[in-house]
Amino acid sequence: MSGPPEAMVVCRGVTKRYEGAEDGTLALAGVDLTVAPGELVAIMGPSGCGKSTLLHLIGGLDTPTAGEVEVTGQRMDRLSEARRAVLRRRSVGYVFQFFNLVANLTVADNIELPMLLVGAAPAEARERRAALLERLGLGDQHRKVPSQLSGGQQQRVALARALANHPPLLLADEPTGNLDTASARDVLALLRDEHAGGQTIVLVTHDERVAAAADRVLAMEDGRIERELRPAAGDDLGRALAGLLTPAPPGG
């Protein structure tokens, strides 16, 4: 049996160009990135700088125009769409910026379904779902459908769903972006706990409090990683990112 990969994520010269304009819109311009197992990496930068595009490519939701994307030792850019979907289901938890919950399923079903799809026993799925919802302060919301929840509650359900299968890699696009202060604190505490337990996390955020919990912060601008900061080493995020981050709405 092979051991864990030396790197959870590897991007080599990743470029993404969207067709439309005369020469296409260049979203990413030759990004190189390596994320070690167990690392928490935060990606920051102004809206439109390529943060979410990079996360989509790592998660196999899109393919690069050029370059290589490797996740858990497998080349995402070489897999068919169907095989990428299987890899995501088993190895990647994804928290979308706008939730992407199944509207006609209950909270319980939204969280349990990914576990059932990979063969978990129903009782095991219920137990895991109940534990996650309790940690996120939603223990009494499992019978509701997403439309009956606030935006912040839906985001917490999306996080619980992403963690349901104990994925080796968790990707999160603005995981606290739709939350009030108390809810954001709960989500950040859960992310810290998961990280302390060895979970690899790559997230996009505008929130310096979230970024401060990361091992590394990557500051992006114009489709490139412009600098790398390490909060634990005393790097001043506010000073280092001044002029790069803007009070624009989440996105990019």
Image: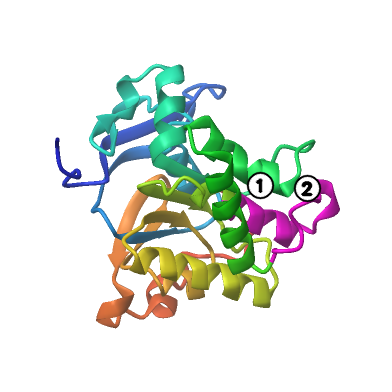
Find disc 1 in the rendering and name its residue: 99
Compared to residue 210, the image places residue 34 above or below, namely above
Residue drawn where x is 79% and y is 59% of the image: 150
Q: Mark 2 vs mark 1: which is more N-terminal?
A: 1
Compared to residue 152, the image places residue 10 above or below, namely above
217, 221: nearer the viewer = 217
Rendered location of residue 67, percent (x, y): 27, 29
Find disc 2 in the rendering and name its residue: 146
For residue 167, the mark is none
* 2 and 1 marks in contact (CB < 8 Å): yes
Rendered location of residue 60, percent (x, y): 43, 31
What span is in magenta? 138-160
**Left or right for 157, reference 46:** right
Name which residue type carries label 1.
Phe
169, 216: nearer the viewer = 169
Q: Nearer the viewer, mark 2 or mark 1?
A: 2
Q: Callout 2: few (<14), some (14-19), or many (20+) C-alpha neighbours within 10 Å?
A: many
Note whether residue 55 is visible. yes
Cα gap from disc 2 to disc 1, whole angstroms: 10 Å
Residue 7 magenta-drawn? no
